[in-house]
Amino acid sequence: MVLALALTVNAQSVATQKHEMQSGETLYSIARQYNVQVKALMDMNPGLDPDHIMAGQKINVPATQQNNVSVPVVDPQQQVVTPNRPRYKTLHEVKKKETIYGISRMYGITEEQLTAANPSIKKGKLKKGTVLNIPYTTDEDAQYQAEQQRIVEEAQKPKVVMYPTIKAAIILPFSKEEEKMSVESQKMTNLYQGFLLAVDSLKQHGCNVEVFAYDEMSPATPVATILQKPEMKDMQLIVGPIHQWNVKSVADFAQQNHIAHVVPFSNEISLVNEHPTTFQVNAPSSLIYNQVYNRFSVIHKDHNIIFAMMNDKNDNMTFFNDFKKDLDVKGVQYSNLNMSEFASIQDMLQPGKNNVIIPSSGSSSAFENLCKKLDGLNLTSEYTVQLFGFPEWQMLSGKNDKYLGKYQCQFYTAFYSNASSARTQQFNGRFRRWFNQDQYNTFPKYGELGYDIGVYFIKGINEFGSSFYENLHNYSYMSMEFPMMFEKKNDWSGYQNRSMMIVTYRSDGTVFVR
């Protein structure tokens, strides 16, 4: 940043003007009136006796202020003009018996500051009638410089640009050349369809949007060719691509052209590094896990916690072991159970207390195995058992509903679609009417993901324009499936979604999300 510096200009040649003295005027008052120094008046009027000036007498006055011409301060890069001020704070006419020390104390400055501003005076000797330059105090100088810097910084902030029409590009592997749509292309088509529903909803509220769709997998138009299209630089939003080998080139392009870039799926930890306009919807697992550990320890700190080693091929040992380490650091007690010795759980369960069991696997087979073994214990009502698990448990509804409610199953997740909610059912009905089909039965629901991305980013850019990034913490959206709470990884990176939910199935069949 280029900081403004205070500048002064010494006048090389001074034009003059005439002033006719009025009754009561002094050389000091004339100096103040014309913002000049008394010495300048004396130099312009040789032989003038300052103690014997009569009304009607005409004296020469400099047309400019010698040795004290103040000019506006200009930042050479930004051409920012900041306010100027006189070189000195005021003038002081020395009275009888006044000293340098006394005058300095009067104005809150040091003797050194006073003599530096008046090199013609000798320390300790002042003549009555001498007019002194009074400099600003150290605090006043600091305040002035701080204000100068603030003005320059404010002027350097980019002006907010609002967009009458928001242009959005979707780059997804539609694979239109395929004879039959693959599962991936069906999912990507659903995402695009959900995005179009978002655009339609926003248009009904006065938001103008243009959407440009490109096939990431088209051999005739690879991503590099897509980025060369003339309309791409005019985009305010790019969603995609999906494949890791294409993401960086689009992120680079978005950064160069200051375009918001959304990556829907990749949870690569370094994805947003040095790409300040890129948004990572699917956060890295390590970020999610840390939030899970913190939320769990708050909710269940006073409960009886049991970690169950399932010995399943899908055991998530990183999550499982790090979870226990985190509780160790927090001083939260827990027990360890191996499913090969399940009978020992009888000694671990505590009556009258909530017993929370955390299995090492989120697979449906591991879940069913654990629930069946718990059923076999025939526990009395004084034993409350709750299971805490994984996002995959969203797919257990149906044949496992009895277990989900009976054991008040609770799981963490970055996304959740509540099929029984009125909002989800309305969306599904609208999706069906628009596209004559249901969303592809997958996990997550890609149509809802596309809708959430579309509404969140287009609505935000429409409201805040080019200052969208600076206003993320002033902006919220009630998601359909994917809550979005973006934070910068560091000062030079893009944004990662830090949103995480805890979903709980209740015994009455309802679902609680927090």
Image (tube, rainbow, N blue to C red):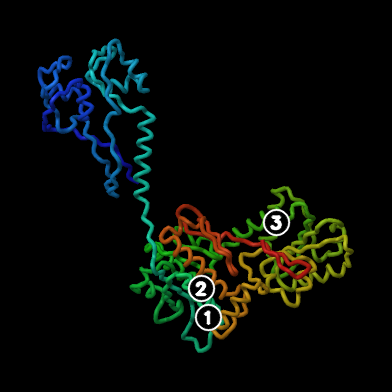
Amino acid, disc 1: Ser
The residue at 11%/31% (across/down) is: 17
Q: Are marks 1 and 3 in contact (CB under 8 Å)?
A: no
Give how far across and how far down residue 398 sits, in percent: 73, 77
Instruction: From the viewer's side, name the closer residue of 360 and 119.
Output: 119
Alpha-carbon distance for marks 1 and 3?
37 Å
Q: Residue 30 at x, y = what percent? A: 19, 25
Residue at mark 2 to residue at mark 3: CA–CA distance: 37 Å
Looking at the rendered structure, the kind of residue marked 3 is Phe
Q: In the image, residue 341 lies at what x, y percent?
A: 83, 64
Q: Earlier in the sequence, mark 1 or mark 2?
A: 1
Assess whether mark 2 and mark 1 are in contact (beta carbons under 8 angstroms): no
Residue at (48%, 63%) from the top-left corner?
Answer: 460
Determine the residue located farthest toward the front in the rendered image: 23
Helix, strand or loop for disc 3 = helix
Q: Tag 1: Cα neighbours inside 10 Å, few (<14), some, or many (≥20)?
A: some
Task: Decide: is 125 above or below 76.
Answer: above
- Mark 1 residue element: helix
For disc 1, the marked residue is 185
Return the residue found at the far bottom: 179
Query: Which residue carries the number 3 mark?
Result: 296
Using the image as rendered, state which of residue 267 and residue 38 is in the foreground.
38
Q: Which kind of residue does numbered mark 2 sit on?
A: Ser
- In contact (CB < 8 Å): disc 2 and disc 3: no
